Amino acid sequence: MLTHSPDSLHYPALHPPPPPPPPPPSARHQQENDSDNGDSQGYDSGMAMISFLKYINGGGAGGGGSARGTPPGPLARDSSSQSTGSDSPGGGYKGSSMSGSLGPGGGYTSTLTPMHLRKAKLMFFYVRYPSSAILKMYFPDINFNKNNTAQLVKWFSNFREFYYIQMEKYARQSVSEGVKNVEDLKVSADSELLRVLNLHYNRNNHIEVPENFRYVVEQTLREFFRAIIAGKDQEQSWKKAIYKVIARLDDNVPEYFKSPNFLEQLE
C-alpha cells in the first residue's frame, strides 16, 4: 500500500526481477524514458519521486496531484492560463474586444462630446429638421441608444429655437422701421442677421456658409414678416405654419460630413 505525507512520499520495498540480459543501446534508451513501468532498477529514490510526480501531473491521475497537496506541474499551469485568457507569453488576450474596435451599433462610443455638438451646429446650415435616421447616418462613430439619440434631437431643437428667435426679432425690427413690402427684405452674404447666425453655429468658421442657407434665412424672415403684418402673431400657435414652410427647405448634408476624420478637422 502506497503512503505519503505533505513533506515526502514513501514507497514499499519492491522485489526486482532477475537482471535481464544487457539490451542494445536503443532499447536501453527506451527503458530509461519509461516513467511508469514500475521497475525501480537503476533508479534511486529521487528519480522515483520525479517519475511519480511526472506521472501525476501528466494527466495519468486525472489531476489528482493537486488534490493530494502536490503543486500542479508546468502543463497544468499552461492549460489554466490559456483557458482564462491570460496575457502571458504564448497566449494572447482573448477575454474582450479592444477599446478601439467597433461596437454592436457600428460606432466607437455612446458619449456625445463638444466636438459632436460643433458638427451638429454645422449640419444646421443644411437641415433644420433632421430625422433620427439622418442623424445616425452622419454620426457613424456613435453607438446610438435611446438617451444619446434624444440628446442629439434636443440639440437641433435648441438650434431651431435660437434661429426662430432671431427671425422674429429682425422681422419685428423691419416692421418698426416702416418696411411695407415683403420683397424689400433681402439677406445678403454680409448682412448683420447672417453674421449673428454664423457666429452662433460656425464660430470658428470651419466651413463657408452655404448659399442655400442664406436663401432659407431670407425666406424665414419674410414668413415672419408676413405673419406679423397680417396680425397672425396674436394667435396662440401662429408660428406653426411658418415651421412647416421652413421644414420643406431642408437640403442634403454633404457627404464629407460622414468622414471618420471630420471631427479631427474641428479641433
Image (tube, rainbow, N blue to C red):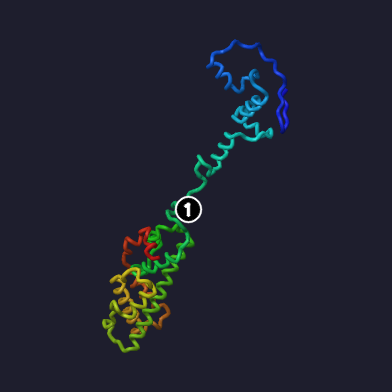
Residue 191 at what x, y percent from top left?
A: 31, 80
What residue sits 61% from the left and 11% below the top? 20
Question: For residue 194, which quarter of the picture?
Answer: bottom left
> Which residue carries the number 1 mark?
99
Viewer-nearest residue: 131 or 22: 22
Q: SS for tag 1?
A: loop
Viewer-nearest residue: 218 or 6: 6
Say which quadrant the N terminus sits in: top right
Indicate left or right for 32 with 135 as reference.
right
Name above or below for residue 181 compared with residue 134: below
Question: For residue 244, which quarter of the picture?
Answer: bottom left
Q: Residue furthest left?
A: 183
Residue 92 at what x, y percent from top left?
A: 49, 43
Residue 186 at what x, y percent from top left?
A: 28, 80
Q: Amino acid at mark 1?
A: Ser
Name above or below for residue 139 compared with residue 48: below
Name above or below for residue 117 compared with residue 96: below
